[in-house]
Image (tube, rainbow, N blue to C red):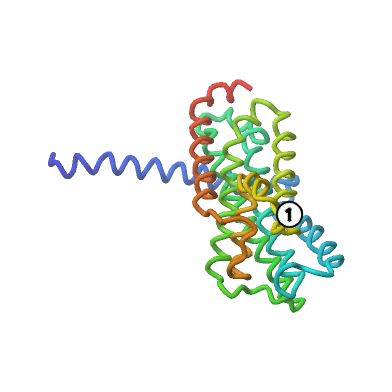
Amino acid sequence: MSFIEQSSQPTARILQAMKAQGRIVGALMLRDMRTRFGRSQLSFLLALFWPLSHMLSLFLPFVWFSKYVPLGGSPSVYIATGIAPYILCMYPARMVSMAITVNHPLLMFPIVKTTDLILARIAVEILGALVVISIFVFLLVAFEVDILPPDPAIAVSAIFMSIVLGVALGVLNVVVVSIFKFWQFIFMAVMIVMWVTAGSTTVQFNYSEQTKYLLSFNPLLHLVTWMRSAYYGDYSAIPLSKAYVMGVSFGSLFLGFAGDRLLRGRVLLQ
């Protein structure tokens, strides 16, 4: 047997294993989409309704009562650019964190691993987030809101990183939530604090430097700043640090999957 044939065998086994895991994750995705709200074929559509309705329930009252916005001439654009990062981050974070808890019975099948459950939930939440933001933008355009940004690339990157941060926070918390059920409530309280301090519907230009420094540890505030910079150019409630957002996101992903690996045995015993 030649050296090339010997080296190709491990590669073939790796590809075969990846295909097998891909089939498992795909099946889990379909199950997740069909059973999120019972076994109705419309289950996934109902799952999309909640973040979309949440987004609109925040957007409409703030736009209705906002007589003045600190930037631009459109309250709709200012409020939308603050709310979208929060919803795109919060819902994936919440739903991914429950990936193992709600699907724990599936771990009785030896072929299903905790990583498969997490990856399937991540894929479903990314798909859902993209559909929700697309519908939201379509509705704004339909009502003649000039929501298309001068710099679409920045807006798209902000949307992408909002989803990534949500997924990352969910992965970081998925093992903790599967062991300590009460952590889900603490996690949601933290997300609410992040929302309140992110400047989604306000602006922090008049805050002291010390307050701005403390707020700068909120990655959601950086995402709101990132999104609004696509519309308002040099907008900077705080100095935008894209590296900080990416560091928190990918660091959380690493710690989450490492925790899943280290604590997998304990999770299976729950």
| Residue 31 percent coordinates (x, y) | 63, 45
| Residue 162 percent coordinates (x, y) | 60, 54
Q: Which residue is mark 1?
A: 51
Residue 17 shows in the view: yes
Q: Residue furthest left?
A: 2
Could you say which quadrant of the image residue 205 lies in? bottom right
In the picture, measured across the screen, residue 4 lies left or right of residue 230, that is: left
In the picture, measured across the screen, residue 15 lies left or right of residue 6, that is: right
Q: Quadrant of the C terminus?
A: top right
Secondary structure found at label 1: helix
At x 41% / y 43%, what residue is drawn?
18
Q: Residue furthest bottom?
A: 144
Q: Nearer the viewer, residue 134 or 247?
A: 247
- Dot 1 crowding, Cα within 10 Å, few <14, some 14–19, many 20+: many
At x 77% / y 76%, what residue is drawn?
143
Decide: is 12 above or below 230: above
At x 25% / y 40%, what residue is drawn?
9
At x 13% / y 39%, what residue is drawn?
1
| Residue 215 percent coordinates (x, y) | 66, 47
